[in-house]
């Protein structure tokens, strides 16, 4: 059986609400008590949500789904957490652009080259694209060579 990681929101009245059931691998390891989790989905118009890990339990059911149950409490964002998540988002955008440029360079047949800035990589790619040799004609029409002797 695969190990799952289930997150539950602990409400003020003590009730639990299931937030997510995901493969354990999506977290890499089970969050520890005191950890802070930030969740948001780019494809949905929603604010970032912040949770503090209150408890974690391993539920082992023979012949059924087993895994970690992580109990979370929603918390207000503090300035350091907000700045960290904003920096994370900026890193994602930056490395996404770098990846797109690397793919384009690979498709253009350029050898990997360390470039110190994203702008430098964009300039290098633009120069390579503009100066790339034009493909030769694949036509099979042949002309007689002027040096080839003619037979009578």
Image (spheres, rainbow, N blue to C red):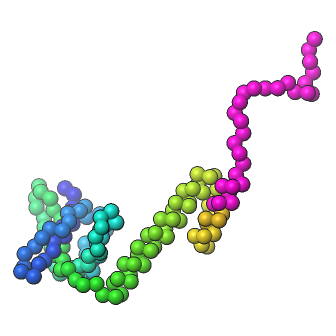
On the question of residue 29 being in view, the answer is: no
Asked whether, in this view, residue 73 is left or right of residue 27, the answer is left
Give the vertical position of 146 relative to 105 (above or below): above
On the question of residue 42 being in view, the answer is: yes
Asked whether, in this view, residue 83 is left or right of residue 107, the answer is left
22 or 142, which is in the foreground?
A: 142
Residue 44 location (% of width, % of height): 29, 64
Asked whether, in this view, residue 142 is left or right of residue 102, the answer is right
At x 46% / y 69%, what residue is drawn?
93
Residue 60 location (% of width, % of height): 13, 64
Q: Determine if the magenta segment contains residue 132.
A: yes
Give the vertical position of 142 relative to 118 (above or below): above
Residue most extreme to the top:
152
Q: Determine if the magenta segment contains residue 43.
A: no
At x 25% / y 72%, what residue is drawn?
30
Which image quarter is the C terminus in? top right
Which image quarter is the N terminus in? bottom left
> Magenta part of the protein: which range?
125-152
Residue 118 found in image quarter: bottom right
Residue most extreme to the bottom:
79
Residue 62 location (% of width, % of height): 10, 58
């Amino acid at each position: 059986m695969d190990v799952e990681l289930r997150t539950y929101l602990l409400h003020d009245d003590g009730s639990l609400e299931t937030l997510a059931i995901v493969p354990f691998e999506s977290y890499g390891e089970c969050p520890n008590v005191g950890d802070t989790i930030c969740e948001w989905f780019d494809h949905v118009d929603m604010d970032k949500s912040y949770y503090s890990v209150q408890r974690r339990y391993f539920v082992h059911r023979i012949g059924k789904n087993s895994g970690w149950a992580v109990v979370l409490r929603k918390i207000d964002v503090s300035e350091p957490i907000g700045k960290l998540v904003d920096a994370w988002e900026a890193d994602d955008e930056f490395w996404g652009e770098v990846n797109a440029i690397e793919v384009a360079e690979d498709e253009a047949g350029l050898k990997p080259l360390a470039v110190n800035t994203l702008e430098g990589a964009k300039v290098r790619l633009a120069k390579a694209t503009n100066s790339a040799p034009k493909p030769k004609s694949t036509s099979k029409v042949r002309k007689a060579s002027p040096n080839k002797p003619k037979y009578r």
